[in-house]
Image: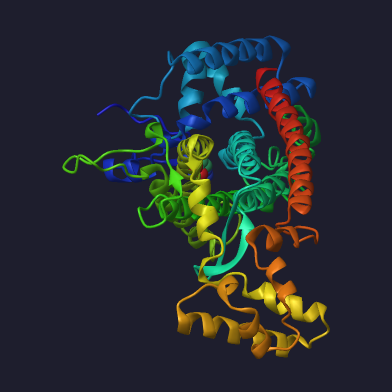
Amino acid sequence: GEKIMALWGGRFSDAPTDAVFALSRSVHFDWRLAPYDLRSSLSHLKVLRSSSLLQEGVANEIEQALGELITEVASGKFLPIVSDEDVHSALERGLTEKIGATGGSLRAGRSRNDQVATDLKLFTIEHMLEVASSITHLQTARLAKASEYGDAPAPGFTHMQHAQPILFGHEIAKHAQSFARDLERIQDWLVRTNVSPLGSGALSGSGLSLDPAATAQDLGFSSSSANSIDAVSDRDFVAEALFILSLVGVHLSRIGEEWCLWATTEFGWAQVADAYSTGSSIMPQKKNPDMAELARGKAGRLIGNLTAVLAMLKGLPFAYNRDLQEDKEPLFDSIDTLRLVLPAVTGMVATTTFDRAKMLAAAPLGFSLATEIADFLVRAHVPFAQAHEAAGKCVALCEKDGIELDQLSDQQFKSIHSALTPEIRKVLTVQGAIASRVTVGATGPTAFADQMKLATTNLSRLSKVIAAQRKAFSEMMGA
Ligand code: ARG
């Protein structure tokens, strides 16, 4: 095969065997770090130049070649070849092909160890912000759907049994809270992640007059690493990102499960739009909610990627070890997975319609107004335990007679508890029950309107923050 160009040939008399090279090689997956590698090379070059470690002419030559590589990598003109081990060696080959041995000067004071940590951080920051932006689109769709059904009563469930009536908008809006937390998680992950490893060298820092604080600033980081050994071995930012992505996946899977359930013939609440459904190759009548199922199913691989990285990190000693090369594929896969799932779920949510009449008819079933009877008695100063007991007796009587709570006679109510006057009928309605829920965060119309207002304000604030961060990042990359 082609002669392998390793970056460490000097002390070796034998080239790696095919098996060694095959196992070592990462360029087929780490090539997507190339733009970040080139960008951080420009920052490193700046420092080598300003500290006069590189003569002006040489620095100019390298800068010119890096600029060309940036364009050629973006257009696909420059690509890795079979003998390239990883993204760093491929790009150094590119540099030396352009300017000869001078291309090797850029490695001064830098190791692949701090380089790969820097590249991967930049990649992760850019893509976590992209995920955040997709989440804001999902949030917009979800809040719009919640307000569309903000006046539609439906049964609320615990244990998947009818519990108490709620507004269906309240049900839809609940997920906006979990994704809002995910957005906040990404923001505080960013604060911890925003530390530059560049300048840490292989593990001990550098004896050359580098300026890690300056490279950090140049790359948009807020500071440079406080410990060079930690800097090259820390992958907390990968593990944390994978956790956040897993949790986003878990949240999407819970949406998926609800959508599947609501689309069943038995429920018959959700009409998933044709564009977000798939058919069956044998059963002509079928319309399946595959997007919801995939949202549910993909959570598995996201969690798998998180556990793969945690298991790889466990017990890893002393700074860089090659095990760390295993951080990339799980991370890339989780990012790519959410890039697929988020837009599909967003579209599915935005285009699903719900059967208001069916939900309204189901709302009082299963004696879901029994709590209203207990609360009615509490307002009449009956101790709650007795109120609960009396309401339970009402349910038992209904079950025996095969009727609903509002079909009990005045006489029957009175015989169960003397405080159960005919006034009870006022609270035995779905609308009455929902309207009575006035506490903060409750399903009552006023509290629901407040919730929606707050969620909308919050979302627009976060959307602006994320847009500004993405803009700053792409400006840094293009600088
Ligand atoms: N491809 C390696 C990785 O992904 C880059 C760092 C290699 N460093 C080394 N000393 N072998 O982790």
Q: Is residue 108 above or below residue 364?
A: above
Residue at 75% in and 57% down: 441
Quarter holding residue 392: bottom right
In this rendering, would 147 be left or right of 52?
left
Residue at 59% in and 87% down: 393
Residue extending furthest left? 282
Instruction: Estimate the x, y position of residue 338 in percent, counting from the top left.
Output: 50, 41
Q: Is residue 368 above or below residue 96?
A: below
Instruction: Estimate the x, y position of residue 257 in percent, counting from the top left.
Output: 45, 55
Residue at 65% in and 28% down: 40
Q: Nearer the viewer, residue 162 or 435?
A: 435
The answer to whether residue 259 is visible is: yes
Quarter holding residue 452: top right
Instruction: Estimate the x, y position of residue 469 in percent, counting from the top left.
Output: 73, 31
Location of the N terminus by quadrant is top left
Scheme of colours in the image: rainbow
In this rendering, would 78 be left or right of 321?
left
The answer to whether residue 125 is visible is: no
**Numbered circles on residues, count:** 0
Q: Nearer the viewer, residue 300 or 231?
A: 300
Q: Nearer the viewer, residue 42 or 174?
A: 174
Residue at 59% in and 29% down: 36
Q: Is residue 248 above or below residue 478?
A: below
Q: Nearer the viewer, residue 231 or 469?
A: 469
Quarter holding residue 467: top right
Instruction: Estimate the x, y position of residue 173 in percent, counting from the top left.
Output: 64, 49
Location of the C terminus by quadrant is top right
